[in-house]
Image (cartoon, coloured by chain):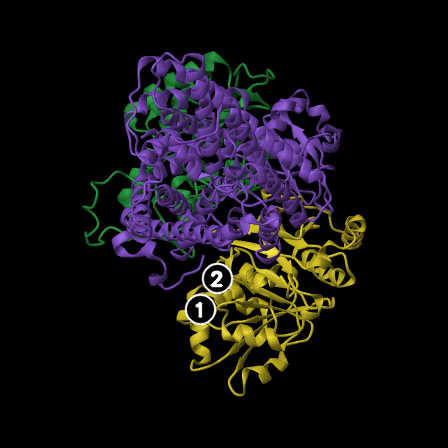
Chain colours: A purple, B green, C yellow
Amino acid sequence: MRSPTTWRRPAMWHVFRSDDRLLLIIAGAVVGICSGVAAVVLNQALIAVLGWLRSYHTYGWSVLLPAAGAALSSLFLNKIMREGAGHGVPEVIYSVSRYGGLMRLRSSFSRLISSCLTIGSGGSAGPEAPIVMSGSAIGSNIARLLSLNDRQRVTLVGCGAAGAISAIFNAPISGVIFSMEVILGEWAASHLIPIAIAAVAGTEISYLLQGRQIPFSHQQFNIGFIEILACIGLAVLSALASIILTRTIRAVHHRADHIRWPAWLKAAGGGCAVGIIGLYLPMVLGEGYHAIRTMIEGHFAPGIGLVFIVCLAKIVATALTLGSGGSGGIFAPCLVIGSFVGLSYHRVLVYLWPAFDWVQEGCFVLLGMAGLISAMLQAPLTGIFLIVEITGGYEVILPLIIVSAISTSLCHYVEPASFYLKDLVDKGQLLRPGTDARVLADLEIRELLETDCISVHADMLLREFVDIVKQSRRNLFPVEDRRTGHFLGMIYMDDIRPYLFDPLMYDTVLVGQLMDTQVKTVAPDDDVLEVMERMDADHLFNMPVVANQRFIGMISKSTLLDQYRKELMVQTYHLNR
Amino acid sequence: MENNHYGSRLFQRDLNFAMQLSIEKIAHALELPKGKIERWIRQGRIPLVRQDNTCTFDQQALERWASQHNLAFRPDEPQMPKCVSSHENSLTAALQNGGIHYDVAGAQAREVFQSVVDGIDCIPAANKTLLVEKLIEREALASTGIGKGVAIPHPREPESIGIFNPAVAACFLSAPIDFHALDGRPVSILFVLLSPSVQTHLQILSKLSFCLRQEDFVAFLKTPPQPDALISRLGQMERLCEKQNPRQR
Amino acid sequence: MHSQLLHIFRNTPLGRESFMQSLYFCKNVGATPVVHIPKHIKFLMYFDNDVVQVDLDGSYLTDPETAEAHALELITSYDLTPKFLTPKNFTASTLPDIPTNFDFMCCPRSVSDLSSKIGLGYIGPRVRRIVSSARFPVLITSPVFKPWKRLAVFFGGSANALNALKLGLRLARETGVPLDIFTQAENHSREDYEAIVQEHNLMEELERLQRNWTFFEEGTFESNLYVVPHDALVVLGACGHGLIRDLVFGSKMEQIQSTIPNNLLIVGPYYTAGL
């Protein structure tokens, strides 16, 4: 390991050496500020682009604007930044779970630019996921600058994500909860304080630069018992909507994969379709926060049927934008679709029971949003706290909890993995801390190797072999070729016990006649999980490790258990405190 | 990291971070593979600060960490397991302790044992009668006459005799006696084995049995040999035995 | 000793030269070559403290149908066991992760640029980042295959150079080829350098294995480099002394790589020599 001058490694300064919490808090605050700045930059850029393009919406060819934006964003991402396609947040989760949060520097700003192009031109996506990815990448690279270890780096990545969400929604608590629930996947005390500080820093910088703005105004709602019962219906509906959304996006993705066009052309195609939809239903384009605002305030004009159609159109538009290669997140579309669902449900209720004094429709809009976010992200707490914070009101918290919890459970039943985790789970690559897969992923064959076996040669007499048995501490002996040293087979004590005590055989039997040549071997860089499965399948407790045709040691289940347990205790210690 | 009172150690002078060890020594002290320690340092799971191959740490903190994770931190344990020095278990040394006795008189086992035990100096006088009884007790269980005229009497619980170094007394009887040996022949040579522990006893016995398996050695014993010749011959055989069975060293 | 060398195979005549170099190295040192035939134009390598994205030059994806057969043919001609690496983890659908737990890696001077840029004096930015972050030494091959018959270690006295020296000694011990050491003695005497070696208990082994320890006392470094044998594998450290050692490669290293065309085995700052 390098021995740089100590000033380059703050983790080694006297103040921080015994307790790194202060270092993480300071670094977390810095990361939070940077994420906040990134959020503000994207927000202002989007406002600017939207303002600039507004004047062109009257023209007929404005249908092509989303196509152009999506194509440009795809070209930028693939050719200039040379970054692979992807939604962003799954990449953050993948890197946190597997590599201690290492992320490339280019991820700090590439998604900001590309999503600005996509969303600004009218694509139906949200700016949240790109900002989360930028913030996380900023956190990761600041950790790299400070030469921090994996655990500290993961904390800073979490700080970046928290700062991002807090800055976008002016909602620090949601930022913290989102970061710990979705990105990190564990609620560890050592992460909490720096992440909270980062969330506050992000919010403050956003206030400073953009002014205090709660995105949606606070309305007073009076909830009665019947409304709470009605929430259950809404929960079911939002779960349904989230399933439809996920499946549609996946279907478009799948279909797009099969089309043999270059990436930017596919993105352009998707954008074109979105543009056409947008021609008839302009509220479907872009983030959609304006529409949500009107709905909460109760001023959304169109009737039930149209609301339904808009809702479906939004689902399709989002699927087209994201599935065909556009760059953006799922957060904002979820909020919009959720609000449409809530709105239509409320209008149906009013239609069916007009006599009853229902609460204003704005309330159900909020509940719909919460339901959909919770179901899509499989993160009920994030949904609840986000809605509470962005609307500034606590009265709705009881129905919020009901809707979030029920819709999450229902969605989980049909689609067990959240939208972000789906790809990882499908490829079997999701590693959550403290799980069996995580512990096994860390173990290596080299660490489990037992090297106390004595090798014998195939042309040895049994008499010489007996002398070797006297000296050995094991019941297995690898057999090697005398000339080349190649591994030929194994001798198992169980197999030769009957012959060991018969002096008559000592000079008449060669070791080569006793060995088992059909023995299954393991290579030193094999995956420990695979090796365990092989052992289970063949009912073996020991296997020889062979590299380059040479025997280097044994793997046994007992050593594996010992090391597994030590690893597990170290990995989950803070979870059990 | 452990749950310190927050902030109290921030400004404490860095008195404790004094311990420095190489990674290999730490891995040995924790009884874990080196690769695992390196990985835990990289992941931040163990309170060590690494620079090249040495680690700096606070010993108390590391010991606390180890106990919290069910590991033992033993930095002072020697690298190799203690092996008993070969000198203590050497057959020749034991023979020199026990002595070589010629013309031992006696018509039966008990008398022979009495004469032999009287002649051995390294046993405390108080234990001599006890030793004779133990030898007879052992004979009663099963004869120690292993054939070819040689017997290897020994007490069943060697610790009770109270000697600190193994001793083998080689006794050449004046007249062969009946020992109910395995091959029925009368016995004229005795090797009385005395050891401080069962392990030592087994090791000495194993070496002796290796020697006695060789026909020419038994023939040599029957001569009977002079003390120097016997000791040097026994030394030769012992080296041969050790070469073939290094684990017994 | 069981060690592994990672090689990214390029299915072109130029790539063949590079590959033969790797195989020759493996054969002599007793390492197993692990060959990756790229299916995507870029991949990620996650090191301890850095993630490096390697964007390969388009020529790395030439003729995928014949790539494996060609590689196999070359491997068997050197009597080695073939071992191919297929990445199991992907950061994004077109971005595989290549593991980094190898003992050596072979790179040409540049992986991202056209083959024309492989002349002297140029080491591509990706290769530089790999050297700076990796735990293993990187073998940078000369454009044309030439079997090396001796080792030349450059020792400058820094901690990094010491690791290079240990690596050189280890290779000399395993391969049995003669070892020469070169030092540019600037402001220090021969005794100072020998004292450093003595301090780390390497003197005995050094005397046993080395053939010559040449001290350049006069003349410019570049002109002194002429005495480095043409058929030597040069082992050197990447970093130098001083404050900026963490940011850029050492000046000696830059001079060496721009003057001599031999194969270079560069030891980065994160390399810890074994015994």
Instruction: Identify residue for label 2.
Output: C269
Is A446 located above or below residue C202 in the figure? above
- Residue at mark 2: chain: C
Relative horizontal placement of residue C75, taking residue B36 as reference (left or right): right
Q: Determine contact: label 2, label 1, CB under 8 Å.
A: yes
**Quick one: SS at disc 2?**
loop
In terms of depth relative to the viewer, which is nearer, B200 or A559?
A559
Q: Is A391 left or right of C170, judged from the image as shown?
A: left
Q: Amino acid at mark 1?
A: Arg
Residue A61 can be seen in this image: yes
Q: Nearer the viewer, mark 2 or mark 1?
A: 1
- Please state which amino acid type lies under the numbered disc 2: Pro
Question: Which residue is pictured at 71% across the width and 66% down the height?
Answer: C115
Per the model, the C-alpha gap separating discs 2 and 1 is 9 Å
Going from N to C along the chain, the mark reached first, 2 or 1, is: 1
Where's residue B34, x and y in %?
Answer: 46, 45
Q: Which residue is mark 1?
A: C245
Relative to the observer, which residue lies in front, A259 or C68? A259
Residue A65 in the image, given as x and y percentages of width and height: 59, 49
